Amino acid sequence: MKIMVCYTGSRSSLQALELAIQHAKSFHGNIFLVGSMEKGTTAELKEIDKMQEALQEAAQKVEKEGIECETRLLVRGFTPSEDLVNHAKEENVDEIVIGIRKRSKTGKLIFGSTAQYIILNAHCPVVTVK
């Protein structure tokens, strides 16, 4: 079973990782830790480095549990939500696990919701962790 965790290093994504580890143990799966950024300009190099560091730390945690793990930082010009859905399909993952946080209706309207897009457009089951 291929489990993709949408990882940002946030508290909610860490909780999503914990659940993915449980699923991987139960279903003999492996984990894909994936982060996505829309642009990769030189002004954003610090943010890219920070994201790569967070992905590597999370991968070490997964590997300590004896679970196979791969990390990917996607910087392909898509919005993170589009990029994550496309990547899940390209890799033929069986499940997506994503952390969510509460946002007001106005916040969703103005900023959109990555989780909402993934839930509505993914080809496979999506598990959300709050």
Image (cartoon, rainbow, N blue to C red):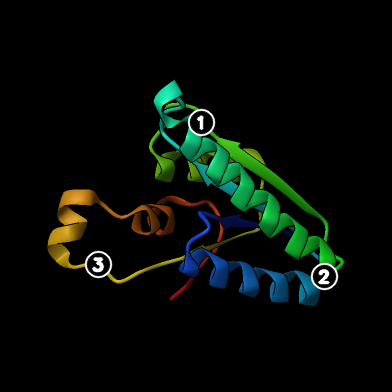
Pick whichever of labels 2 and 1 is earlier in the sequence: 2
Dividing the picture into quadrants, the one containing residue 58 is bottom right
Horizontally, residue 121 falls left or right of residue 63, namely left
Mark 3 = which residue? 103
Question: Horizontally, is 111 left or right of 80 in the view?
Answer: left
Residue type indicated by callout 3: Arg
Q: Residue at x 68, y 56 (%)?
A: 57
Q: Name the kind of residue labelled 2 in the image.
A: Glu
Q: Is residue 41 visible?
A: no
Q: Secondary structure at mark 3?
A: loop
Upstream in sequence: badge 3 or badge 1:
1
Instruction: Decide: is 17 above or below 110.
Output: below
The furthest residue to the right: 66
Q: Which structural element holds mark 2? A: loop
Q: What type is the residue that disc 1 sits on?
A: Val
Residue shown at the point (51%, 31%) measured from the top left: 75
x and y percent of residue 45 in the render? 49, 30
Q: Residues within 10 Å of mark 1 (few under 14, many from 20)?
A: some
Q: What is the spatial separation of the Cα atoms under label 3 and label 2, in whole angstroms?
A: 33 Å
Q: Where is mark 1, residue-wise? A: 75
Q: Which mark, by number, is residue 65?
A: 2
